Every structure is written in C-alpha cells, then in structure tokens.
Image (cartoon, helix red, strand yellow):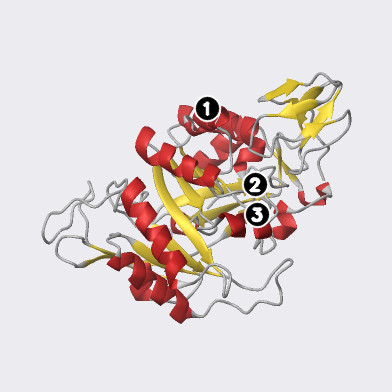
Amino acid sequence: MTPESNYPGRWWHALPDGRIQCDLCPRDCRLHEGQRGLCFVRKMEAGRMVLTTYGRSSGFCVDPIEKKPLNHFYPGTSVLSFGTAGCNLACKFCQNWDISKSREMDRLMDAASPEAIAAAAVRMRCQSVAYTYNDPVIFAEYAMDVADACRERGIKNVAVTAGFIHAAPRREFYAKMDAANVDLKAFTDAFYFKLCGGHLQPVLETLEYLVRETAVWTEITTLLIPGKNDSDAEIEAECAWIARHLGRDVPLHFSAFHPDWKMRDVAATPAATLARAREIALRAGLRYVYTGNVHDVKGGSTYCPGCGKALIVRDWYDIRAYHLNDSGHCDGCGVQLAGRYQKFGKPFGQRRIPVRLSDARTTA
C-alpha cells in the first residue's frame, strides 16, 4: 500500500460559504474541509482541491490493444494498462467494482511517476499506455502528466472512459490523448440516472467533441444488460444517433454483461442478444460493429466496407488473419479502413501480463 498524495487539483473554485466546488465533471461536488467528492479521490484539504491518487496505481498490466477494446488503433500491438481507485459514476452493474468503487486504498499497491511509466512502456515494447480499469477523468492531472512523458518517448495514449466530464477539462484532457474508447452505457437518461447516478447528455457531448473537433481516434462500447438497455428500440435509437451525429465509421462494440456488484440478480447477456444488436447496427448503416465478452469470430472480425472481405479475423483477442497494407487499405479492393494503422508484425495475442513497475527486470 502506498500513502495518499495531496497533489494540487485543477478545475475547482471557492464558494462564498467556505466550501469549494469541483468543476471537473457534471457532478459539481461541493466540499467542506476534509470532505471528498463522490469519486472519493478528489478532496478539500487546507482550503484547496487535492488529488489523493497521483502516482498511485491499482496495478499495471500489459494487454492486447483489442482488450480496451480498440479494434482500429494499431491492431495487434500491446498496451501498458493501469488505473487508480474511485469513479465519478455509481453504476450498479460495475464490472470493475473492486477497483472503481474502492473506499479503502488497499487496492493502490504500486507507485510510479509519469517518467517511470513511460520508461516501462518503452522497456516492455508497448506502443501505447491506457488509462483504464477506473475512469481516468478522476485522475486527470496524473494521466495528463503521464501522457506528456509518453509522448516524449513516442508512446501513444489511450483513454478508456465513460466520458462524464465538463467541457473545459475535456479539452485539456483529450489534447493529451491519441485514442479513446467511450463507454456509452445506454441511450436513455432514465438508465443513467437510476443505474449510474449520472446523465446521458454530457456523454453524448463528449462523443461529439471527440469525433467532430479532435484527431483522437474514438470507438464506443455499450454493455448490454438484459431487460435494462437491450430493447430493439433503444439499440436502434443509439445507432441512428451515432450514424447521424458521429458518422458511420465510428466502431461500436456491444459487450456482454455478467452479474456483478449490485446487479447479481440479473442474468448474463445471451450471445444471441449481442448478435441481434450487431445486426440492428449494421442495418442502421454503421460499418464497423463488434461483439465482446463472448466467443464470436464473426462478431469480432473487421470487414471491408467495400468488398465485404474479412480483413482482420479475430478469435477473442487473437488475430488469425490480417489483410491490410501498412496504411490500412484492403488488399483486395483497395478501400481505406477507418482507423490508425502501421506495418503489421507479429501480433501480441491474448496474453495478459501483470507487472510491477518497481521491478526493473520486468519484461514482456
């Protein structure tokens, strides 16, 4: 266990009654001295905002980039992933609740400076670093400093996030990122309010900002929960919005829910539900639609929007076939696939390698 930090936080202002207000996310938490926001890691201390998890991680792991999931961002490469503790949403179905819902800091067992993380990514031959497991929005100061250190060494930066953030910090945060997977949890505000303690509109604004105003490569994930957000009507509405507001080239991942946290009474998502959602999305005109958390080669593979050829065949996170040139063109008809590509080498595969940054001998 590593001790709490009191790193100076950004995006806050003082209130007339002596409290401070956090301006990072739409929660707008108003804090008394010693009080923490809902995220648990931003705190009023000595009249100012501090971040208690700067330099403190719940652990590091080398993953395939497809696990984020990102299927169009340098396929087959490895990514050094890490998170901290806490979250600014309160999803009852959280799949990483032991990290994101932690109210004790016993999960923060590794310490690393931004420079150490960047050096580790180089040492372990990772092309990118992912801020994940919990939402990097709440440790934005730390993530942004890590991102700066990574860029100095040619390492890309990936945010895996729910996109629940105010406009001003959003601009600063994503200026440091090269790719993002945004968790669009449902397409009704009632779902966000009742099951996540948040609202839908800020997430839609984040998606529009990323796709229309930045060069950040963006993919979307929706976790389908039986009886909660998996109706044909809701999926159709989501896909129509994506096509109209973001464009048909933004990849969409439908992933399977498993009973967890405070929703253990809901059954796991059937594979047929994911297949049905994928068909709805394809009918809506979306070009790249995937299924996740299930064994589905068809739903995990990437197809050419020109000739229909299977260009990247995936079995879970294993790439079994690859038919793109170095710039991402189909080797059959020559159509350019949306995404970021380079010369394809030996894929990393579906390995997951936990690492401790304190161990300089760790290699991938």
- Name the residue beneath numbered marker 2: 83
Question: Which residue corresponds to mark 1?
Answer: 172
Q: How far apart are marks 2 and 3 (CA)?
A: 25 Å
SS at mark 1 in the image? helix
Residue most toward the left? 333
- Mark 1 nearby-residue class (10 Å; few <14, some 14–19, many ≥20): few
Q: Residue at x 53, y 59 (%)?
A: 186
Judge depth for marks 3 and 1 and give the one in front. 3
Number of numbered tags placed on the structure image = 3
The reply to whether residue 125 is in sight is: no
The numbered mark, 2 or 3, whose residue comes first in the sequence reads 2
Nearest the viewer among 2 and 217 is 217
| Proximity of marks 3 and 1: CB atoms separated by less than 8 Å | no
Return the x and y of residue 182 as percentages of the image width and height.
Answer: 49, 49
Circles 2 and 3, Cβ within 8 Å, touching? The answer is no
Three-letter amino acid code of the residue under disc 3: Phe
Q: Earlier in the sequence, mark 2 or mark 1?
A: 2
x, y percentage for residue 67?
Answer: 49, 59
Identify the element where label 3 is drawn: helix
Residue 237, image x and y in percent? 41, 61
Tag in front: 2 or 3: 3
Callout 3: few (<14), some (14-19), or many (20+) C-alpha neighbours within 10 Å?
A: some
If you read the primary sequence from the N terminus, does the residue marked by circle 3 or circle 1 appear first? 1
| Horizontal and vertical percent position of residue 358 | 70, 42
Kindly identify the amino acid type of the residue bearing the numbered disc 2: Gly
Instruction: Please indicate, yes or no, whether residue 241 appears anywhere in the rendered image.
Output: yes
Kindly identify the residue that appears in the image at 49 percent across and 61 percent down: 222
Q: Is residue 44 above or below residue 100?
A: above
Q: Nearer the viewer, residue 50 or 74?
A: 50
Which residue is drawn at the image coordinates 37% and 41% (left, top)?
A: 211
Residue holding disc 3 = 193
